Image (cartoon, helix red, strand yellow):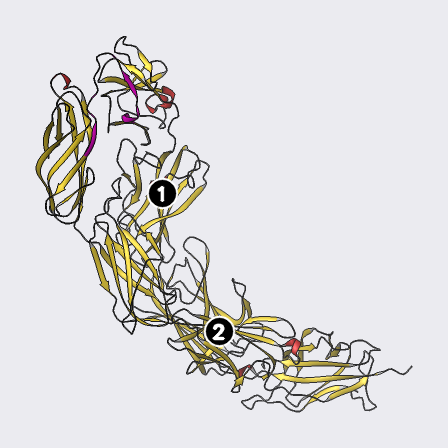
Amino acid sequence: MKLSEFIISALGLSLYLSSPASAQLYNYSYNDTGGKLVTAKPDTAFLNPSGVITLNLISGLDRKERVTVTRDSDKTSMFEGTTSLVTVADRITSTDGAEYYGKSLVLPTLGEGAFTLKSDTLDNKGNLVSSSTYPFSIDITAPSIPDPIVWIRAGFMNGSIDVFGNTTATQALSVSRLSDAGSGLSKAEWFAIDDAGTRRAVPTDLNPLTGEALAPAAIAAGVVVAPKDQSYYTVGFRIYDKAGNYRDVTHRSAIDRTVPAFMQYQVQNAATGVWQDYVPGMTIYANPLQFRFKMRKQDAADFNGTDFGWYGQGKSSDADFAYINATLSYPETYNYYEIFTKAGLRHHLSFNTLRFTLGPGVSEAPRYVKGIFHLKNANTWSDGDTVRMTSPDCVDSGVVTTEVRSYTQLVNIDNVGSCTIAPNQTSCTLTTNFCKLTDRGYDPRQIIITGTDAYAGLGGRGSYLYSYWDYNPPVINSVTVKPEEKQIVMRVTDADTVNDWRSYMWVTNSFALTLTDGSGKALVLSPASVNSLNFQLKEVVFSYGSLSSGQYTASASATDTYGNQATTKLPGTIKHDVAPPIVSVMFKGQPADGQLVRGLENLEIHLTDDMTQPSIISVSLEGGPTSDKVKVGWYNKGNNISGLQYPRIFPSTDEDDSYTLTVVASDEAGNVTTKASRFRYVPDNLIEFNNIKTLAVNTSLKATDNTPLAFLQTNSIRKKNGELVTGPQTGTLSVRKDAAFGITLNGITVVAGETKDITINFGTGDGILIPVFPAEKGKRGISDFILELPQID
């Protein structure tokens, strides 16, 4: 039976010829001092390898990478090495999943210090093509922590580094005199390790300026690190430097977040001497009266043999209960009593919440109503018993008001002054010269109101004269412009702020940034965020991204709650660029979109920007007959024009096999553009053959002279340098997916839509003659294929 004819269309033979390339460091890879595998970007300033460093270099085919590392301090050469030639086998998959062509080199252990890495790209003759340099520093020494953890008291009673809670007596835990001579302090963690060995950690405050880390009480004894309300933990700080090294400091502590639930109030009946449970409105037969707190002994650390529960304060006890006694006058306006656990947690009772009925012949104690005070220099009266001074001043007089009583009441303000309220009157006026002239402070003076004569035992503390003052401005430590984030970051210290229960008294919490444009128009910005780096240092972030594009001058201010202000003016101008760079992918002077691009070496990436310098972030190529995806290196050709390195990719001859080149670029202001250009691709040196017509049989047919009926044949082929292509050369054989059948070439069978590696022996350089025939018999049609030799050995 006669076999049907078919046509093989040989699209071409492609040879890779060298193109310009640029040496690029893709990343560093190493095991850090903590044993963790780290992949660091090329612009990483500090590395902390425990041993060698692997350099992963993105390059192009037919290139070598030469690397030198020099120590900056004395210019000593620490490493010199050159890779072998980059081939099609050198396709690397990075830890982030990206693929590229390149090589890796291993640096020896370099020691600590600052270094400069220079990467040169060489052609296959050893000639320099391009160079790049990368500064980096190695720091493998952990931060210094010379001091132990310190427990900071907020006030109140009890609590310690050994037993603490999440509130009341505990203000924070801290560690001071931290330092790092290498990369500098970076961040801090607070952690707790339970008895099972589970470590739980949270970020906490670090002030790199003062070398102090701080864990506020709510964090230090919080449920995140200490899930059990009452338990023992190994607690501590982990301090990191910028290279990633860390050191721990620890302490064994009991953490307690529990206030025992049972508490009974009792009043002694003055008529019978019997202690009675308090009931609102109960009758009292004496004033002052005897009062006590009743608690279970099992809830008291004094008796239960643990570190958990009520502790101290002179308790008496019987078989089951413990007691704390107090004397109070009724009615009370200010006095209170607090009972504390060993961790410093409290039970609080304000005596003014108690309600009694007076028995026969029992008189009421004085009751404070209000006090107002006059500032001499400001010539103002306070609204109540709190005086705030924003400039040096003196209290020169005051008026104290009480409820009316039938007896004379004596008002005495501790070391300030006194006055007398006559029977059936409600106020008196005192004169004084109570001055606050420097610095800052808080000075509470007790306002004691008592009866006289037969009523002298009644009364007590009614309130305080509270004086607050602050004449010290905050300090603006630094102002940093971050163009890429379109932010200005200001750090402000208020040295008056304290880290105890008075932390709210002297603070800086008003911040402003004034930007003035070229026309003189001023815009005042409020903070986008305010973060406390520690109790005195705040980081204030202003965002100017919504403003119009242009150049601005800037000034910043910080004002405390007393009106003291610090200001600073930023040097120079801020370039606010809101327009992203324009990216164009060009082929021989025309946009590459939709074109048949002959040779990636003829593609150019053009960048333009109206205000700041643009640069390429990444280039990737995706698509083609094999649905490839690869990162591509680039090199600078000047005038914001870049060329591409050559990866191994397969030619695409129809629209379905097109490639998409995606370029991501940014400018100095952080504006980012992504440009995608879709085109078909064939090598610039594609050799096209005529159609080959043969019979539909899956074997090589020969003519009477023993030559193949269908074949590929070339004459001698030379490289650009004039050398003959000789010997075995490895390439790929691809058949278009719309082909009517697969083909067999040089013993390699490839079906439609498939690509396989193939080796062709060019012998001594006289050319080749290779049989080609269908992979299966009996099929008619056209089958397009391409033979590509991407690299000539």
Up the image or down, 752 lies above or below 561; here it is below
Q: Is residue 658 left or right of residue 780?
A: left
Return the disc, 2 or 1, that comes first in the chain's sequence. 2
Q: CA distance from mark 2 to mark 1?
A: 47 Å
Residue 15, image quadrant: bottom right
Task: Say which mark, if any, is on residue 236.
Answer: 1
Q: Is residue 509 left or right of residue 452?
A: right
Up the image or down, 20 lies above or below 320; here it is below
Residue 789, image quadrant: bottom right
Residue 265, given in percent of the width and then of the height, sits at: 33, 20
Q: Which one is nearer the viewer's eye here, 779 or 402?
A: 402
Q: Is residue 58 magenta?
A: no
Dot 2: element:
loop
Instruction: Name the residue located 33 percent from the left edge and 54 percent from the top edge.
Output: 530
Q: Which portion, as a residue range, is magenta?
A: 350-370
Camera sees residue 485:
yes
Q: Which residue in the structure is indicated by mark 2?
A: 83
Residue 231, given in percent of the width and then of the height, sits at: 41, 32
Name the mark nearer the viewer: 2 or 1: 1
Residue 186, image quadrant: bottom left
Up the image or down, 584 lies above or below 106; here it is below
Instruction: Name the residue located 11 percent from the left edge and 18 percent from the top edge.
Output: 453
Disc 2 residue crowd, few under 14, some 14–19, many 20+, Cα 10 Å: some
Q: Amino acid at mark 1?
A: Gly
Residue 322, given in percent of the width and then of the height, sits at: 32, 18
Q: Which one is nearer the viewer's eye here, 151 or 90?
A: 151
